[in-house]
Amino acid sequence: METQQEPVGEHTASENQSVPTPGYRIEGGRRYYDRENIAYVLPDDDEENDRVHLQHWLLKVIFNGNYNSPVEDALVKGIRVLDSGCGPGTWTLDMAKTYPNSTFYGVDISTRFPEAIKPPNCHFKVHNILETNGFPDNHFDFIHQRLLIAGLLKDHWRKVWYLRPDLIMYCANSVNKVITDYVNKLAPGGWLECAEPAFGLSHNIGPKYQVLIDAFNAMCQARGLFADIPNHLEDIFRDAGLINIEHKVAGGPIDNDTQFGKLGWEDFKSAFIGLKPVVSRVMPEIESDERYEAFLDEVREECIERNTHTQAYRIWGQKPLVESE
């Protein structure tokens, strides 16, 4: 299926709050994707970009850096890096400024990223990562992807069987669609790194917090999303042929008196406000804006009382220098 990509500069962040645009829908004053070839359930608007900017800094703090792959020396010398599903480009821009000798490419399904004001070693492109991206194989030394738990279906992540035209049965060959493509684009010895929220590893959760997570999981199941993807990424990396695989789980309080805790709550609340259309379908009793806001406030108080901690999962692996036969 051909991707219907919007031309660069066609829709800016300031336009997308309330103006109907082909391929999008407006719901509750927020702009959402409305295309069959895009599974992403969160909004595409200024508010979501602000949340993703905030989330970048939170992840940088809890993981003590923008990445864990052993690529520091290579980045300083100069390598090619792909940030896949880059959103507004916060990670891409931060890395490009830090490592001026390396070249960074960010791709996303819409023009959420800056087009003019950016470092000279930073480039952006509109691209659906489920489609062929135009980059040659063995091209990148480091590929980064994160926070697509609400944007990729299970069949985009996991092994899927495909039907060969010359057979009347499903054959035993299989692929991990997205991850395998990344491995193909990696140069031998290159590194792939992914990060996703790990709701199942949250600490000290209460019943109201659990209601939101259950609603999110139900929404993911209904839409074919992979809510527990952190539990499967190591196997997916290994099946794709990566070696030297490691992972790290890190987190922090969802709300307390610290600056980190307050920002953590802002990120959590903003995400679930963006998810209101799908969550309220699972929980119609909180469908009104007033009741939904009130319920989120109740969740916040519960998190403070229980000292709830959220967790994130980061995994990295290396493409072998010599492909196994």
Image (tube, grey):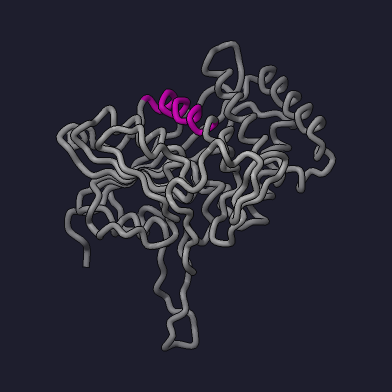
| Residue 219 appears in view | yes
> How many numbered circles does the render carry?
0
Please provide percent x and percent y for residue 139: 23, 53
Farthest top residue in view: 257
Q: Is residue 164 above or below residue 276?
A: below
Q: Is residue 35 above or below residue 75?
A: below
Q: Is residue 55 magenta?
A: yes
Q: Nearer the viewer, residue 85 or 311?
A: 85
Farthest left residue in view: 77
Q: Nearer the viewer, residue 71 or 169?
A: 71
Point 53% across, 30% down: residue: 50
Point 56% across, 22% down: residue: 253
- Quadrant of the image containing the C terminus: bottom left
Q: Is residue 64 left or right of residue 274?
A: left
In the figure, residue 57 lies in which quadrant?
top left
Point 67% across, 56% down: residue: 222
Please provide percent x and percent y for residue 209: 69, 32
In the figure, residue 267 lies in which quadrant?
top right
Q: Nearer the viewer, residue 17 or 104?
A: 17
Point 69% across, 23% down: residue: 300
Q: Is residue 167 left or right of residue 72?
A: right
What are the residue bounds of the magenta stretch? Answer: 51-64
Q: Is residue 141 above or below residue 64?
A: below
Q: Is residue 59 magenta?
A: yes
Please provide percent x and percent y for residue 95: 31, 32
| Residue 245 appears in view | no
Please provide percent x and percent y for residue 247: 38, 39
Q: Is residue 253 left or right of residue 284?
A: left
What main secondary structure does the magenta stretch of the protein show? helix
